[in-house]
């Protein structure tokens, strides 16, 4: 939890493991994976999933959105207001019972755009 809370980035489990080993050299990957699962289930950290096998962890717990670079994978937070009716319309079209909504902007970050 310390690694995630002290990071400005949205870390992968492997990045949490690498940072965590600097604090605890004997740390195992299984301990990190199990701890991330526990912390997420207890609502102490956020989890961002981008398809199969692409999960990052977030220290921000309140609702927010993200932009992700399709070239380098850079992920940044966005504070967007959700228009009235968007959740209801999404639920109507998908026939899902809504719990929350998160928006993801995909494109090129400033660095990749200028290459």
Image (cartoon, grey):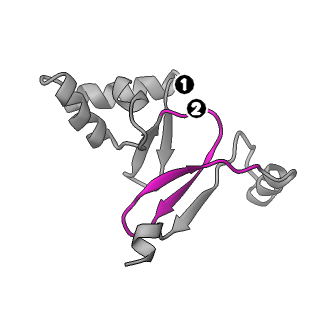
The answer to whether residue 101 of the structure is visible from this angle is yes
**Quadrant of the image for the C terminus?**
bottom left
Task: Name the foreground residue: 9 vs 94.
Answer: 9
Task: Please indicate whether residue 65 sits to the left or right of residue 40 in the image.
Answer: right
For mark 1, give the secondary structure: loop
Q: CA distance from mark 1 to mark 2?
A: 8 Å
The answer to whether residue 70 of the structure is visible from this angle is no
Mark 1 or 2: the one toward you: 2
Task: Please indicate whether residue 115 sits to the left or right of residue 98 in the image.
Answer: left
Residue 43 is marked as: 1
- Magenta span covers which residues? 59-81
* Vertical side of 48 occupied by 89: above or below: below
Q: Which x, y percent locates residue 104? A: 59, 57
Task: Please indicate whether residue 37 sits to the left or right of residue 93 in the image.
Answer: left
Q: What residue is at 83 percent from the left and 56 percent from the top? A: 89
Q: Given contact means CB atoms under 8 Å apart, are the residues at marks 1 and 2 in contact?
A: yes
Q: What residue is at 25 percent from the left and 34 percent from the top? A: 19
Task: Name the foreground residue: 61 vs 100.
Answer: 61
The residue positioned farthest toward the left in the image shown: 26
The disc, 1 or 2, on the residue closer to the chain's N-terminal end is 1
Q: What residue is at 18 percent from the left and 24 percent from the top? A: 27
Q: Which x, y percent locates residue 98? A: 74, 43
For mark 2, give the secondary structure: loop
Q: What residue is at 30 percent from the left and 35 percent from the top? A: 16
| Other-residue count near label 2 (Cα within 10 Å), few / some / many at <14 / 14–19 / ≥20 | few
Q: Which x, y percent locates residue 43? A: 54, 24
Q: Which x, y percent locates residue 3? A: 34, 29
Whether residue 103 is in magenta: the answer is: no
Q: Give the main secondary structure of the magenta stretch.
A: loop
| Other-residue count near label 1 (Cα within 10 Å), few / some / many at <14 / 14–19 / ≥20 | few
Q: Which residue is mark 2?
A: 61
């Amino acid at each position: 939890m310390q690694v995630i809370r002290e990071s400005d980035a949205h870390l992968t489990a492997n990045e949490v493991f690498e940072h965590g080993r600097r604090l605890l050299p004997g740390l195992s990957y299984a301990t990190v994976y199990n701890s991330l699962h526990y912390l997420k289930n207890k609502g102490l950290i956020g989890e961002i999933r981008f398809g199969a096998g692409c999960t990052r962890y977030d220290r921000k717990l309140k609702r927010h959105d993200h932009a992700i670079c399709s070239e380098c994978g850079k992920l940044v937070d966005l504070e967007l207001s959700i228009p009235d009716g968007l959740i209801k319309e999404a639920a109507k079209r998908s026939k899902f019972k809504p719990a929350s909504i998160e928006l993801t902007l995909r494109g090129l970050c400033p660095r990749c755009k200028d290459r």
